Amino acid sequence: MSDRYLLPEPVTSVAGWQALGGGQAVDIARRLGSDDTIEELGTAGLRGRGGAGFPTARKWSGVRSSPGTHRYVVCNAAEGEPSSFKDRALLRANPYQVIEGLAVAALTIGAREAFIGIKASFRPEMARVHRAIEEMQAAGLAGDVPISVVGGPDEYLFGEEKALLEVIEGKPPMPRLLAPYEQGLFAAGSQMGWESVPREPGHGPGRDISNPTLVNNVETLANVGHILLRGAEWFRSMGTAGSPGHAVATVVGDVVHPGVAEIDLGMRLSDLIAEVGGGARPGRRVKAAFSGISNPVVTADRLDTPLTYEDMEAIGSGLGAVGFAVYDDSACMVEVAFQYSRFLWIESCGQCPACKLGTQEITHRLNEIEACRGSEEDVAVIGAQLAKVTDANRCFLGTEEQRVISSILRAFPEEFAAHLEVEGNCPNPRTDLIAPKIVELAGGVATYDEHHRKKRPDWTYDP
């Protein structure tokens, strides 16, 4: 099996995948058994690549040991985190390794069915996935569990694991109350807090109706077959002791050529920006970088931080999905704060009033400040709303607002002060700034979702 996940030429057939050494992971998992398969992933130190970085072995073990008659496994391919394109790059390059990892997961936790949740707008990726499943099943390489592909909406929350389950069940992407390992797909208990579904055949009375469900990201599952074939020590030969392995990283924004590439964890952020993104544009310097829209800003004086879970946490940020939006010294950070806050406000589902109303108020006040119509009162209101925007939240969106916007206020107070001291226009205007939700990334060019500018907070669009 090739030790590269993004090959120079895409893998276009199951025969091509087998020629590279693929297609052996399910048999290896059968020989090892569930306990040893999970132990191998634990020894490797694989962590979830969707953003949270939770240890994969612990997640699999937790779902496998949770009480319940039926279990399910879900591949989260609903990539919507701004500045991330890794999952689509992997599915275009080699969907077979992802299907193989999903099949191993289903076998290991004893799932009765597997699903892949992917945005319907990801047409090339969906076509590749459908074909890969058919070929893998025909070749007997996808295990015995049926695999279904579910196309979903473009909403940001489709990628939130509890909302993802709702979409698979045919509902809107509204995060439910309990985590998938507590209450998974087609569970008969209360899910949203107000409704339930009929009990599935085969269930008895009691708590076994919870249907514990494993949800893993595309990149997480892509690692599984490689680790089982090559061994945990091979995986640990890359990266660092605390953050072993490698990752598929994205760099977009104010760089020479946006791109996506494989890196060993432990690489410095400054080197990532230089090697994958080509560095800052001519005559400019990097002012800030954001790991998606979920983690606090990384300022210019911390760009030499190693890309590990522990090092990024130590500087008060996070590794996230290893997708970075870079801003140079021509960018107004008040405008960046407004664009990020607006994205989260628009994408908030509205189930939690503190989140929807708080992000709305913060966005409005940031817009006033950016337009040089703001006051100290606006700054105070923003601070007050940030303190409570996470109240009773069902998902992480309110926390994202709190972490990202607070960090920009702390890191660039002089820019906010400058907007309060002048009248008329932003001191450092740029009309091209937008939350970097990537539609396409190819040939050194990143295309963002300009249509999102017309999206309303009820998820409809202006004409």
Image (tube, helix red, strand yellow):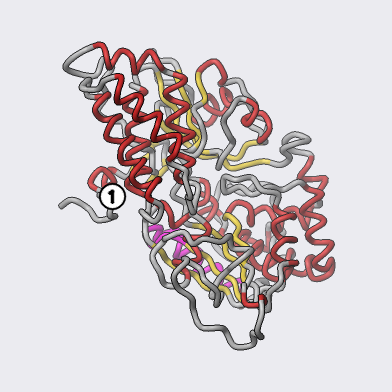
Secondary structure beneath label 1: loop
Q: Main secondary structure of the magenta part?
A: helix
- For the point 58% across and 54% down, which residue is it? 217
Q: Image quarter for residue 179?
A: bottom right
Above or below: residue 435 compared with residue 19 = above
Q: How far from the left and from the top, in percent, is residue 208?
A: 67, 77
Q: Residue at x 50, y 65 (%)?
A: 165
Q: Is residue 269 visible?
A: yes
Residue 183 to residue 369: above or below = below
Q: Residue at x 16, y 17 (%)?
A: 424
Does the stretch in magenta take in 133? yes
66 vs 287, left or right, is right
- Mark 1 — residue? 457
Which quadrant is the N terminus positioned in? Answer: bottom right
Name the amino acid type tagged 1.
Pro
Is residue 134 covered in magenta?
yes
Please say if 369 is above or below 97.
Answer: above
- What span is colored magenta in the figure? 118-136
Tell me residue 366's x, y (percent): 30, 29
